[in-house]
Amino acid sequence: MDIEQADTPLPDREILTWALNGDACRSLAQMVADDGFVPDIILGIARGGLIPAGALAYALECKILISLNVEFYTGIGETLAEPVLLPSLLESSGLVDQRVLVVDDVADSGKTLKLVNDYCENQGRVAEVRNAVIYQKPHTITRPDYSWRTTDKWIDFPWSADGPVAGIEVSR
């Protein structure tokens, strides 16, 4: 896809370019800062939340960036019945007494954010958990604390719009 095409939205799609992603992440970081929330840990939901989580970690000067892997989407508009927390190396004792900012690219159904929020809360003695997403859908069951934009369209993110590189075999 060339640059000119990337700036022209497809019907029923929201197009997030790399440049617009930078603006969105900076705006989210400003919302968090303006709210007075100072996270001790930024937890990015892999895979879609990793890029915004890294940007927020830099903008908020948060040195501890961790991730959890959650599988939910299996294709465009196709999901598992419920999100699944994949095996993690996250040591839950590291969340005790910490303010955690959970970051993802989108709160669509809200089930993934709920799963991760519940995971953090169930680890015991987490000081506070808040959520930041680039996009939220109007029907999400988990309203994020910080959201850059609301849309009911399918979103093409710059890191996933082109799909896998040809020749890469994906095993499941």
Image (cartoon, grey):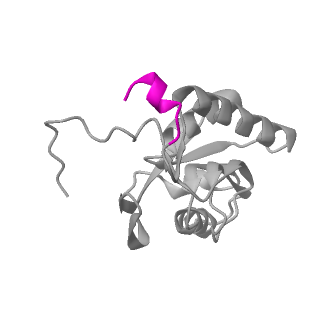
Please check the rendered image and state whether residue 4 is part of the magenta-colored stretch, yes or no.
Answer: yes
Q: Position of residue 55 (x, y in %)?
A: 60, 31
Report whether 133 appears left or right of 16. right
Task: Please name the residue shown 57% across and 53% down the image.
Answer: 106
Give the position of the C terminus as an image quadrant.
Answer: bottom left
Q: Position of residue 4 (x, y in %)?
A: 47, 24
Along the line of sight, the residue nearer the viewer: 29 or 3: 3
Above or below for 2 versus 155: above
Along the line of sight, the residue nearer the viewer: 19 or 104: 19
Report whether 171 appears left or right of 74. left
Please check the rendered image and state whether residue 12 is part of the magenta-colored stretch, yes or no.
Answer: no
Q: Is residue 81 in sight in this rendering?
A: yes
Along the line of sight, the residue nearer the viewer: 45 or 5: 5
Give the position of the N terminus as an image quadrant.
Answer: top left
Q: Position of residue 72 (x, y in %)?
A: 41, 63
| Quadrant in the picture for residue 2 | top left
Task: Please name the residue shown 59% across and 62% down the image.
Answer: 120
Q: Is residue 62 in sight in this rendering?
A: no
Which region of the structure is painted magenta? 1-9
